[in-house]
Image (cartoon, rainbow, N blue to C red):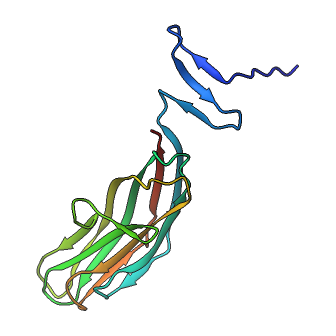
Amino acid sequence: MTSKLKVNVISDGGDNNIITSNGSGVITSSKFKIGQILQNNFVSSQTTTATSFSDSGIALAITPTSTSSKVLIQVSIFAQITNATNEFAEGEFKIHRDSTVLDTNGRRVGGFATRGHGSELKFKGYQSFTLLDAPSTSSSVSYKIFFRSVNNTNETTFFGFHPSSITLMEVLP
């Protein structure tokens, strides 16, 4: 025997609505603030010696359910930078929402550097960042990571080789 319970509101003992449904499968809650979670993992590698930004291939789209929703972006990238001379080596990455560059207080969202001795400086490891965005739309938005070598063409910046990921979480109003 199959049973089915249909409700449009679940309330607590004080008659406060805890969960409501509009009948189309979309629920809202005063207690649950994450609407959806999307994640994409990448293993493909990208390399650049350019000081202009290049597309890393790391991207993910989300469609917020409300124009008041925010999107929590979490990125974990395996990065490496080398410098064939005995100079400071620095790589940088940024994130776009569609064609808009997102930043934190006027700065790019992430970077990494190395300084050392020898004929080839090298840094490698995971770089992570978290950013809260307010796209103010209920249309699909795409988040994409770009990267570059900062100082000169003696540097080579690599992304990938090991799994990298981007996670998008819709934070409900």
Residue 54 rendering spot, x and y as whole percentages: 39, 81
Residue nearest the observer in this picture, 150 or 42: 150
Q: Within the image, what quadrant is residue 5 found in?
A: top right
Furthest residue toward top: 13
Furthest residue toward right: 1
Q: Within the image, what quadrant is residue 145 found in?
A: bottom left
Residue nearest the observer in this picture, 169 or 173: 173
Q: Within the image, what quadrant is residue 75 found in?
A: bottom left
Residue nearest the observer in this picture, 151 or 142: 142
Please state if 125 lies on the left or on the right of 71 as rendered.
left
Q: Residue at x 25, y 68 (%)?
A: 111
Q: Is residue 102 above or below residue 85?
A: above
Q: Residue at x 50, y 8 (%)?
A: 14
Residue 11 rendering spot, x and y as whole percentages: 57, 16
Q: Is residue 53 above or below residue 4?
A: below
Please state if 40 lies on the left or on the right of 145 as rendered.
right
Q: Quadrant of the N terminus?
A: top right
Q: Is residue 163 above or below residue 120?
A: above
Q: Quadrant of the C terminus?
A: top left
Q: What is the tally of numbered marks visible in this picture? A: 0
Residue 149 rendering spot, x and y as whole percentages: 27, 81
Q: Residue at x 26, y 67 (%)?
A: 108
Residue nearest the observer in this picture, 111 or 34: 34
Please state if 30 lies on the left or on the right of 89 as rendered.
right
Residue 63 rendering spot, x and y as whole percentages: 56, 54
Q: Residue at x 49, y 67 (%)?
A: 59
